[in-house]
Image (spheres, grey):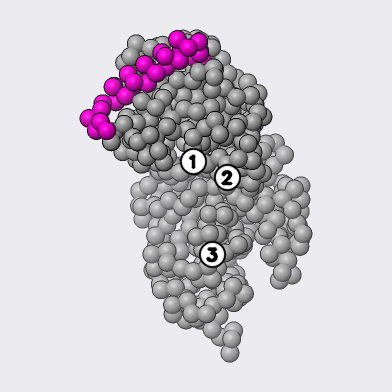
Amino acid sequence: MDPLTTSDPEISIDEAYYIQLQNIKKKLVEGQKIVGKKIGLTSVAVQKMLGVDEPDYGHLLDSMVVENGGTIDIKTMLQPKIEGEIAFILKKDLKGPNVTVLDVLQATDYVVPALEIVDSRVQDWKIKLQDTVADNASSGLVVLGGKPTKIEDIDLELIGMVLMQNGEVANTGVGAAALGNPASCVAWLANRLADYDITLKAGEVILSGALSSMVVAKPGDNFTARFAHLGQVSVNFK
Amino acid sequence: MASEIFKQIADYLEAAELEKREVVKITKTIKPDLTMAEAYQAQELLVQKKLDRGHKIVGPKMGLTSKAKWDQMGVSEPIYGYVFDYMLVDNGGVVPFQIHPKVEAEIAFLIGEDIEGPGITGAQVLAKTEYVLPALEIIDSRYENFNFTHTDVIADNASTSRVVFGNTLRKPSDFDLELMGATLSINGQIKDLGAGAAVLGHPANAIAVLANMLARKGDKIKKGEIIMSGALTSAVLLKVGDFVSGKFDGLGEVTFTVGE
């Protein structure tokens, strides 16, 4: 479809989040479940590209989760792109405002490596902030992998990642690519959700933001993201 | 006489370095058709001039170690130059401003045994490496506006200017260098970041390529050399007064200030 911001240039960010929430509510009525949230637009480069100065978020539903090493039929998606991220699994609720990085670290049960397959319902990814927000932050599918790792022993800011596409290095990244520290992104989310009276709940999976640029997925591709300390996660496309 | 022109190139570049001024590239002045082999001959003369002045080689350094840079320069292998003792600045020290310095974060290899190509692989390099350590490299091309071709930069000792080594030495078997993350900050702001795999898939691969390149002229990597393996990050422009910090996962921090 064309961008919402083309037909309705006046749409506000709050209205865009309202649209997102209405669509999510419909899916809950259909029997789907919320398993977590994703944070997007966490790199300064991407924020500049869209002319914004904050990230955005979307909802993760159980229907979006793909097994580690699984295969995705590309025909079920529109224009998928893939990125490597660190996923937080919470053991305590987090409710903003005033959530700090330290609060996030204390509320985190463990982290795992993740691949997020983003997809946009907007033609050719011609999105503005409001378009992607209304579109559930361009969420598609998510693959969690590796080994659940306690964060006491690792420096999230300096975790290196290499994203391999069919055995070749597609790109590399480091934890700091996500707002300086992936835990800062989760703190941002908890505080932003407070604006809508939403709490991050124990057990939720939080995708904290891309560590590298997005790579376009094609049929036949294998993607494997290897992370320092956290193991690896992979997915195939047919 | 062919060697006369290489001496002229080495003199031209040495004068630019000593007088801290930029010059127009060789391929636009002294030798428009400078080939790669000729550029390394000119570099050898420049290196010899430094040795004659009493400076000592710390080790070779690798440049153009990312595929993105190869595409940009239209080449298909890295380049090398040499780091000398006078270029070293202690961790936390002051790097004197030269012409138009830029900084990059890198992993350095302290070599435990000679490595002689051809046919060297990254795994062999790791087996012969005593320690790896974090480093910040300050590159400072002697060419106007960093405007140079592949052969120009080879003749200019691969833009080498200063090096700051960190104080954390680790055995390469202790961790996975390919997945080691690093950030590069100036005055507290992260300017760029990268993981080990940004260097030819693994920093040890760059050292292997070096051994194989040196073998072409009957040379080898020598025990005791400390070799810069190539940038994990892009090169960030510096100004006087900047406080620069490179943080490396498991290898600590390297810092310096840019002096007058």
Q: Residues within 10 Å of mark 3 (few under 14, many from 20)?
A: few
> Image quadrant for the N terminus of chain A?
top left
Distance in Å between CA atoms under marks 3 and 1: 23 Å
Q: CA distance from mark 3 to mark 2?
A: 19 Å
Tag 1's secondary structure?
loop
Q: Which residue is mark 3?
A: B74
Of mark 1 and mark 2, the one earlier in the sequence is 2
Amino acid on which disc 3 is placed: Gly
Q: Is residue B254 above or below residue B235?
A: above
Left or right? Give the position of B204 relative to B184: right
Left or right: B171, with A63 as reference point: right
Q: Mark 2: which secondary structure?
A: strand
The segment highlighted magenta reads A7-35
> Dot 2, how many residues are within 10 Å of its Cα: few (below 14), some (14-19), or many (20+)?
some
Residue B9 in sight in this render: yes
| Amino acid at pointer 2 | Ala
- Determine the secondary structure under disc 3: loop
Binning the other alpha carbons within 10 Å of mark 1 as few (below 14), some (14 to 19) or many (20 upward) gives: some
